[in-house]
Image (cartoon, helix red, strand yellow):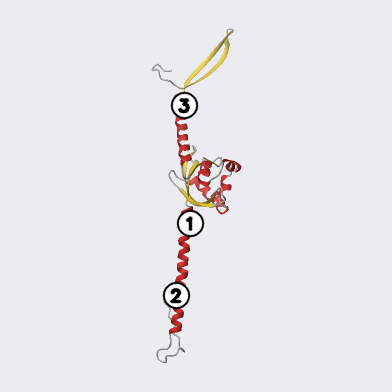
Amino acid sequence: TRKDGSNIDVEVSANGTFFKGEKLIFSVVRDISERKQAEREAEKKQKNIEKIIKSSPIIIFILNLEEDYPEFLPYGMKHCLGYSDEQIDAMQGEYAEALFHPDDIGPYRNVIQKKYAALKDGEALEYEHKLKDSDGNWRDYFSQEFVFSRNPDGTPSQIIGFGMDITSRKNVEIEIEKEARNDEYANRNNHFFLLLQILICSNDPKTGKDDEKRYYWYP
């Protein structure tokens, strides 16, 4: 406690020795208030991040590059993909291999992750991929990833990622493409029948006979 009555955080270290037959204790008291305040702020920040992630409708994770482990990903796996705690535990931390589509895991490991080192602060790495939900269905995802923290040498140490389910949008795009192909097919059939009618009806205007055919094409 300070003279003004405010409390401070201290660290006490003590050593014992004998002097002239008597046991003496030497104690050193250090003020660590600033360090403890920084620790409390970091803990508060961590709790706020966890609160946001747990209540988010999208997948959010923080990837520790040294350990190749995505913190907080299980929350998104439960809320967005429907996995149970038991299913998540059974993956033993191999989330990418368990969730990514076989066509996407290679590009993720060999292309996406190799781009982390060149990312600038605030620069987004964006890509689309498929994730497997708890029922075994493949869902389309759009991901954005940013540098979250760096090592003392400036290289990225953590990546924060956001994954948004775009399956509904992708399904709409597929239906639009399907309708466009059907319309194109229908138009080609209409052109074919129009040409066929012209061929049938195009008799020679001089003789009235059909021994000389006229070919017309209306695109």
What kind of element bears circle 2? helix
Q: Name the residue under label 1.
A: 171
Asked which quadrant contains residue 38, the reply is top left
Quick one: 10 or 44, which is closer to the camera?
A: 44
- Look at discs 3 and 2 and give the one toward the viewer: 2
Quick one: 131 or 178, which is closer to the camera?
A: 178
Question: Is 154 positioned to the left or the right of 91 in the image?
Answer: left
Horizontal and vertical percent position of residue 106: 57, 51
Question: Looking at numbered disc 1 in the image, what kind of residue is underneath it?
Answer: Asn
- Looking at the image, is 67 positioned above or below residue 108? above
Query: Is disc 1 in contact with disc 2, using a CB cutoff of under 8 Å?
Result: no
> Dot 3, how many residues are within 10 Å of its Cα: few (below 14), some (14-19), or many (20+)?
some
Task: Name the residue at 46% across, 68% down.
Answer: 184
What kind of element bears circle 1? helix
Question: Looking at numbered disc 2 in the image, what kind of residue is underneath it?
Answer: His
Query: Is disc 3 in contact with disc 2, using a CB cutoff of under 8 Å?
Result: no
Q: Distance between the residues labelled 1 and 2?
A: 30 Å
Earlier in the chain: of badge 3 and badge 2, it is: 3
Q: Name the residue under label 2.
A: 191
Q: Mark 3 points at which residue?
A: 36
Res. 64 in view: no
> Dot 2, how many residues are within 10 Å of its Cα: few (below 14), some (14-19), or many (20+)?
some
Quick one: 133 or 68, which is closer to the camera?
A: 133
